[in-house]
Amino acid sequence: MILTSKIIFTVLCSLTIIIPSIMDLNKTHATNPQWKPHARLHWAIQYLSISVIQCIALFLLWGNHADKNSILVTWFAGLAPIFFWGMFFPALLFPGTSTWPDGVEPPKNFPAIFKKIHPNMILSVVITLTAIVGIVLDLRNR
Amino acid sequence: MKTRIGKIMVTTVAISTLLILNVMDLNETHLTNPLWTGHARFHWAIEHMQTCILNILAIFLVWQKQQTKLVLLLACLLPMLFWGLFPFTVFFPNADSWPDGIAHPTNWPNWLNQFPPHKIFSLVFSITCITAAALFISDKKNNHQLNQAI
């Protein structure tokens, strides 16, 4: 595996653990009083599973195992962040979904453009495209 | 033989997961539950799609040609990224496994309140995946072939 792709995947997987942990483990998600208990359970499973997937990807990238640098590692580590960020736009096709945290008001002077296109959506496009670039770069150099 | 049984076990769990999620959740209990807020539904949609993709990936990994120990173990792990995480939701405040706003059916057995179907599925499917992983590891013939592949 080429080093560029390895670094790209490492950064993206790390961001996919760090960003939801900072942004979601608070009253916007984890303790949002508007969320019903079963919705919260599914969010908890989603948060945990996506974190575990990134940890597996990081192990595949840097751990000592027989498949190190194999094409399996490229695909899994490249797809790992996409399993979360790449689902943002398809999720909007489900009825009644919203990208803005429930009951949270945008800060004052929040740019109008970000009220229409939430920063999360921009982040999802950037991370998904970067992961695809990482996969393509590695596959082309094999 | 052990490997073949393990593959069938993982495939069964993955297909069951796909069926259960799409039959049980794509209705007013989840997809159109009027009690759910927009962003909660958004995260559920992400989780639903992600779980479906991971289980399809698990089926692909156990039956594709280039198999190594790691590929087979990864295939065992993927369905557990849904079922195996249920017990850990106890660490999240006010999370509950029963669908919001849905009443128990009449004649619902009392013991199912103590151990609801979700938890039974979670336990059975997790044990099945762990058993499949153990079968892959313990199959000496398989290990020899896998080591050659590596």
Image (tube, coloured by chain):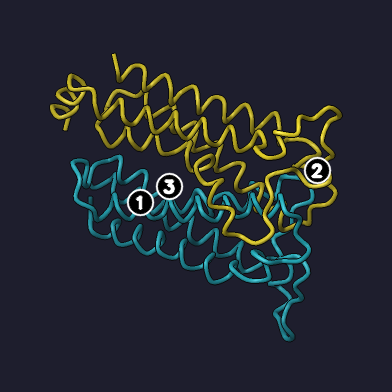
Chain colours: A cyan, B yellow
Subunit of label 3:
A
Q: Please name the residue that numbered disc 3 is placed on.
A: A79
Do the residues at pointers 1 and 3 share their chain?
A: yes
Query: Residues under labels 3 and 2: Cα distance?
Result: 29 Å
Q: Disc 2 residue type?
A: Thr
Amino acid identity at mark 3: Leu
Label 3 or label 2, whichever lies nearer to me, is 2
Which residue sits at x=76%, y=66%? A33
Decide which of A96, B128 is in the foreground and name it.
Answer: B128
In the image, which disc is placed on residue B32?
2
Name the subunit of mark 2: B
Q: Quadrant of residue A73?
A: top left
How many marks the image carries: the answer is 3
SS state under label 2: loop
**Label 3 SS:** helix
The residue tagged 1 is: A57
